[in-house]
């Protein structure tokens, strides 16, 4: 009679086989570990790996080091720390620096506007480029004021009472502010066009670049990428492309890379560490690419950068700050270091990143606009600003020592939304760097810097809401002590970028009110005391049309010049002259439709910030997300109703005036379908197939972007929280992370013990995000949960199903070795590689157990 093992023994053998297959998927296991004879096969297996035959009370925790070696992490530094246990080191040794913020001091207007010299320790604040900058800004101021005066005078002639009524005075004030703002943009674009046409500027930072010379080791540079709940695959694909591009230059030895994570999502945390390990393993980059998970997320991105400076800033002369969607070529980065070395008084050099990589219709139109018109505006900003330029917070190089000394950000005193943490930190850091005597430059003509655009209108407006509040907060620093007037002007431009929207809206409302007064109320002919002759209200449509045409010219001439320059430079990169012109016309229409929509949203943002409405500061989406009809109706519905009501009221007052309001009211009425259809990826791809809204990065993709997209396409599936609980190798990596501590207080251990029991029975769905983070921060609790999931019968079915799924994916994965038969490792006779489906070593001890327990093998058996 043939004896067969009981059903319980078969189940347990299946569990053991499944666990063994997952444990050995990258490395061979010692034969002694497989041939365990203990009553608890998995416990004996883990215990033998750890060096203790019985496994001890906690075999999963004891075997973390051995499982790490089986994970195939190459040369990753693994140490055993008294406080954290076995630890996978992902950061270099700390060298502390002091970076203490100074309190903000406000001065009276006259004192605040007075120029201040450089602080002690900074370079000279006077030089040839300072005189050139002062002269250029004087010319700009004269041009803007002169143009504003002429336009405002013309507007007064258009009004019926020539600006003598209170309503008309208010209109003229708003018009003067708005036309001055438009005029500044016009002359900036004109200066950029002339500079681009000329080909170079002798005062530019790039003109000081020395002939190619060998950079010495003292020019050590850290490339830092702060991230927070980002698309992990996209982040590391971009970082990997940047790494490989630097490697091609032969200057990789000058650079170290730091991924500085503020991520609060548990799944993203797990994925980030796995992606970091994969990058380091593929390129043998341990000791050059580092990953830091910050536990206390103070001051958001600026606090993350400051934390890096305090820990490791002493190791580097420069640092390059990247965004999560940034990609930079190696040649660009090396050239930035050369420029810093050649200009000892430069504190920050900002590149002009080119937008690319999106496929939605909205993003492709915005990419086209930024690529055609953006170079003129950036070159013009450089022309007027020189060494007192903008810093946009990413794709820029910074001199570390003065940044540590002078650019720490203190909280703004007071209460409300315009106090507390400084949100738009980049403008403030540039102002503080210049206050200390260091130059802030825009390298407008340096190629090789890339970023991505928001994929749709709603996501762009969500970003604008954060930026709006940040710029309004910065307005409080206009009178801060010692700032250069140029950077006070930068604060003003930041505020006007959003405050111009409510001013424009108010101007349109006042114009409608003036029409209503003129239509519904008897005209007043005597407007002043003792007036002898009546003042007849006069409308001048011809003057109004002329003024409208002049204003439109200020807005659209820079775009025409941008198209002309692109056509002359190389129209083939934009699809040819015909497609370039067609795309430009489409962008003209699209931007005209978007302008009133943005006007209302920005008006809401400004009023909300001033009224104390707080917002969540979240990372923008990094993929091609589309807008659904329900979301568009919720966000644009009230604006569409306003457009209908406004048009109807104007038509009732005077049908002839509706033509003037039609571009605004019509755009508001079309906002819902415009937002939905422009977010479609399919429309964007069709436009690309027709070579419309084509940009050079699409017609001839740079090597760095090609690599990034290839890495993103072939990115392996990233683990999440359930993986680090079920998968023995992922669990070991998570338990050994520097965020997972081994020692906690008695109260915390008891709380985490209860959490382990609840997670075991309730499955991953029973845990909130903060509870998952608590388990990820406790190596002992996470190892115990892993062991319990595999060995206890009361584990939730969700854990079982995921284990079966992992094994099934392992079977479907392509193999480098074809056979499924037992495969002995000839070079190491004391080890055997275990594949799913192969016979296992005998487990007679399992048959001796009369009760069935442990893992419930529901789902596919290996």
Image (cartoon, rainbow, N blue to C red):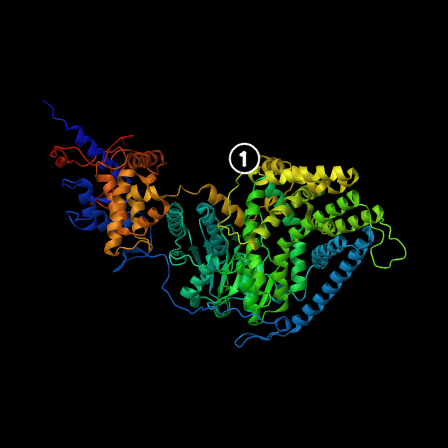
Is residue 517 left or right of 437 when viewed as pictured? right
Q: Secondary structure at mark 1?
A: helix
Pick whichever, 225 or 821, lies toward us.
225
What is the x, y in percent for residue 404?
47, 68
Quarter of the picture containing the N terminus is top left
Considering every residue shown, the one lying at the far bottom of the view is: 120
Query: Along the line of sight, which residue is nearer the eye, 313 or 117?
Result: 117
- Residue 758's spot in the image, x, y percent? 27, 42
**Image location (x, y in percent) of residue 842:** 16, 35
Q: Residue furthest front?
A: 530
Mark 1 residue crowding within 10 angstroms, few (<14) / some (14–19) / many (20+): few
90 or 2, which lies in front?
90
Q: Quadrant of residue 45?
A: top left
Q: Position of residue 333 (x, y in %)?
A: 53, 59
**279 lies left or right of 550:** left
Residue at the extreme right of the image, as rendered? 533
- Mark 1 highlights which residue? 630
């Amino acid at each position: 009679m043939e004896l067969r093992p009981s059903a319980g023994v078969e189940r347990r053998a299946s569990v053991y086989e499944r666990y063994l297959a997952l444990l050995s998927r990258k490395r061979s296991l010692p034969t002694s570990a497989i041939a365990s004879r203990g009553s608890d096969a998995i416990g004996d297996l883990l215990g033998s790996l750890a060096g203790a035959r019985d496994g001890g009370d906690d075999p999963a925790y004891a075997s973390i080091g051995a499982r790490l070696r089986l994970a195939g992490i190459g040369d990753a530094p693994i140490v055993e720390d008294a406080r954290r246990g076995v630890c996978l080191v992902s950061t270099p040794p700390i060298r502390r620096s002091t970076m203490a913020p100074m309190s903000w001091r406000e001065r009276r207007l006259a004192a605040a506007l007075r120029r201040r010299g450089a602080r002690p320790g900074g370079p000279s604040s006077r030089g040839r480029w300072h005189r050139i900058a002062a002269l250029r800004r004087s010319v700009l101021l004269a041009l803007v004021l002169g143009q504003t005066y002429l336009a405002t005078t013309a507007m007064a002639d258009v009004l019926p009472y020539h600006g003598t009524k209170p309503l008309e005075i208010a209109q003229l004030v708003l018009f003067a502010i708005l036309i001055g703002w438009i005029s500044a943009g016009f002359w900036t674009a004109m200066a950029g066009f002339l500079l681009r046409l000329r080909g170079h500027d002798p005062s530019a930072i790039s003109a000081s670049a020395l002939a190619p010379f060998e950079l010495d080791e003292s020019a050590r540079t850290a490339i830092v990428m702060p991230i927070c709940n980002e698309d992990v695959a996209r982040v590391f694909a971009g970082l990997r492309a940047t790494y490989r591009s630097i490697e091609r230059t032969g200057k990789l030895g000058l650079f170290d890379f730091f991924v500085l994570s503020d991520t609060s999502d548990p799944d993203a945390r797990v994925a980030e560490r796995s992606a970091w390990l994969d990058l380091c393993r593929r390129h043998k980059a341990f000791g050059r690419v580092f990953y830091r998970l910050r536990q206390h997320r103070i001051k958001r991105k600026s606090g993350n950068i400051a934390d890096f400076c305090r820990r490791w800033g002493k190791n580097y002369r420069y640092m390059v700050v990247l965004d999560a969607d940034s990609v930079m070529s190696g040649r660009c980065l090396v050239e930035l270091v050369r420029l810093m070395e050649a200009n000892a008084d430069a504190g920050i050099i900002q590149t002009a990143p080119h937008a690319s990589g999106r496929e939605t219709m909205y993003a492709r139109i915005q990419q086209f606009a930024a690529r055609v018109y953006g170079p003129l505006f950036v070159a013009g900003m450089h022309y007027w600003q020189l060494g007192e330029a903008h810093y946009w917070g990413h794709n820029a190089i910074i001199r570390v020592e003065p940044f540590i000394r002078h650019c720490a950000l203190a909280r703004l005193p007071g209460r409300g939304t315009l106090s507390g943490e400084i949100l738009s930190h980049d403008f403030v850091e540039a102002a503080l760097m210049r206050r200390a005597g260091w130059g802030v430059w825009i390298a407008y003509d340096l190629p090789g810097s890339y970023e991505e655009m928001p994929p749709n209108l709603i996501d762009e407006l969500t970003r604008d809401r954060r930026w709006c509040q940040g710029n309004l907060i910065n307005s409080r620093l206009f009178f801060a002590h010692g700032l250069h007037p140029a950077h006070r002007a930068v604060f003003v431009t930041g505020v006007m970028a959003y405050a111009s929207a409510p001013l424009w809206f108010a101007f349109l409302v006042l114009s409608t009110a003036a029409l209503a007064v003129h239509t519904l109320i008897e005209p007043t002919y005597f407007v002043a005391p003792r007036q002898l002759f009546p003042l007849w209200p006069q409308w001048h449509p011809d003057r109004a049309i002329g003024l409208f045409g002049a204003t439109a010219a200020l807005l659209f001439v820079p775009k025409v010049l941008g198209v002309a320059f692109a056509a002359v430079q190389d129209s083939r990169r934009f699809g040819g002259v015909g497609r370039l012109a067609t795309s430009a016309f489409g962008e003209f229409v699209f931007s005209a439709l978007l302008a009133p929509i943005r006007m209302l949203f920005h008006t809401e943002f400004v009023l909300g910030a001033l009224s104390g409405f707080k917002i969540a500061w979240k990372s923008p989406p990094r993929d091609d997300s589309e807008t659904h009809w329900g979301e568009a109706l919720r966000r644009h519905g009230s604006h569409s109703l306003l457009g209908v009501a406004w048009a109807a009221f104007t038509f009732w007052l005077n049908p002839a005036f509706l033509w003037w309001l039609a571009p605004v009211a019509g755009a508001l009425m079309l906002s819902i379908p415009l937002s939905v259809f422009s977010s479609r990826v399919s429309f964007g791809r069709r436009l690309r197939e027709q070579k419309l809204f084509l940009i050079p990065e699409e017609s001839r993709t740079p090597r760095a972007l090609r690599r990034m997209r290839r890495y993103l396409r072939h990115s392996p599936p990233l683990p999440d929280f359930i993986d680090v609980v079920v998968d023995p190798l992922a669990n070991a990596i998570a338990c050994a992370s520097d965020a997972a501590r081994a020692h906690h207080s008695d109260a915390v251990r008891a709380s985490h013990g209860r959490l382990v029991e609840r997670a075991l029975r309730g499955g991953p769905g029973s845990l909130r995000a903060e509870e998952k983070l608590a388990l990820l921060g406790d190596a002992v609790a996470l190892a115990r949960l892993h062991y319990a999931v595999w060995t206890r019968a009361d584990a939730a079915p969700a854990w079982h199903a995921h284990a079966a799924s992992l094994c099934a994916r392992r079977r479907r994965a392509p193999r480098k070795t074809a056979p499924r038969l037992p495969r002995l490792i000839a070079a190491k006779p004391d080890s055997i590689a275990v594949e799913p489906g192969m016979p296992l070593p005998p487990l007679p001890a399992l048959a001796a157990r009369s009760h069935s327990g442990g893992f419930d093998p529901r789902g596919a058996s290996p």
